[in-house]
Amino acid sequence: MLMSTSESFEIHFGNPSKPAGYLRDVLASHVSAVPPDGEIDWVTYYFRDIRLAELLLQAHKKGVKVTVILPATPRVADANQAVIKMLSGKNGLGNGLKVVNFPGIPAPPGRAWKPQLHEKLYCFSHPRPIAFVGSYNPSGNSPESQPEIIREIGDQDRGYNVLAGIVEPKLVRHLIEHARRMHQTSPGLFYRFTDDANRVFKSSDTTIHFLPSLRSHPVVQFLNQLGSGARVRIAASHIRATHAADIMIELARRGAEVEIIAESTHRRVTPDVEQRLINAGIRFRRADIPGGAPMHLKFVLVENSGQVWSIFGSFNWTKPSFWLNHEIIVITSNPSVFNQFTHCWNMLKNEATLTAEQKDLAIHQS
């Protein structure tokens, strides 16, 4: 299985040029590699892949300690129900499965403000300890019995996604502890006030943050330090929040070179946000992938004063992600990771199209 590696990371990118299900196969191979008395800890948003669920049950039966945490009702409310039924049945994971349903918070009439467990975290004890984070949910199924769900959430087994495996021992240990705390105690409405929510895990070149938290949003805080001379490239599956657009626009106004590749669907990245970003001089493209596969990536590449950073995880540029959802964010200055994400960016850029307005501007300037 081809992969990109560095001392601290093992990174796998899914895209339409890879075999369908490439990233689910990465997870499957790691599940199968854990021996009896090993450990697997998963936290994910969508889980519909029956064959992966069967592999987890097989691991459990041979003596692997398996914990899985899933939301009861993600945005497509019944998407996880088949796997939940399977993992909670007579021959299921027993106490190893935890299904969470966070209470909503007070909202104006006609609105619903409800946190979601949006993290994607897959931890394995063997053959070496590793914790995968990123944008990938095992949300597909083969054979697919509910194509209407795939049409709604996008075929993540064929689109652009990433699993970034962290192998630095201290960070892996912290992420496993995070998954197990989530499994042992369901976070409530006041989770953001706890020590767990406000922990920041650090190694020599990498920092891991969690949302919701009382701390300032780590990506916003990082970008607010940049200005003239900085180059910022953003791959975003979702940009809906006015506040998010304001951050990007202000960054461009401070003199940074800002470029965005966004998902093609207007529900995930609204036309109003697109127009505001273009009006601010930001180079904006939509990833119009043949066959309609989704661009589900969430990462930022930063270059400034001879230094580079990669920012990635489960976060979206939306109000729920900013204020309510449980998310993981990784910020690293590891140059190998930056190079790997840059290669992904360049591939994605070949799939993306400028708006007609920006094409006209580019022709005029050439």
Image (spheres, grey):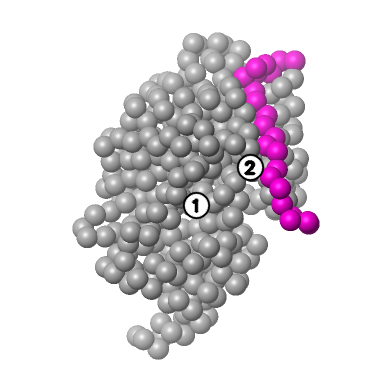
Residue 10 seen in render? no
* Residue that badge 1 annotates: 297
- Please tell me whether mark 1 sits on a helix, a strand or a loop: loop
Secondary structure mostly taken by the magenta-highlighted segment of the chain: loop
Q: Pick whichever of labels 1 and 2 is earlier in the sequence.
A: 2
Amino acid under disc 1: Leu
Quadrant in which the C terminus appears: bottom left
Q: As rendered, which of 113 and 329 lies closer to the eye?
A: 113
Residue 357 seen in render? yes
User: Mark 2, residues whose alpha carbon is within 10 Å: few (<14), some, or many (≥20)?
Assistant: many
Residue at 65% over, 25% down:
98
Residue 318 highlighted magenta (yes or no): no
Amino acid under disc 2: Gln
Is residue 87 shown left or right of residue 287? right
User: Mark 1, residues whose alpha carbon is within 10 Å: few (<14), some, or many (≥20)?
Assistant: many
Residue at 21% over, 58% down:
306
- Please tell me whether mark 2 sits on a helix, a strand or a loop: loop
Is residue 148 shown left or right of residue 142? right
> Which x, y percent locates residue 223?
38, 58
> Which x, y percent locates residue 122?
50, 31
Q: How many marks?
A: 2
Residue 91 highlighted magenta (yes or no): yes
* Residue that badge 2 annotates: 116
Residue at 61% over, 60% down:
268
Region in magenta: 90-111
Quadrant in which the N terminus appears: top left
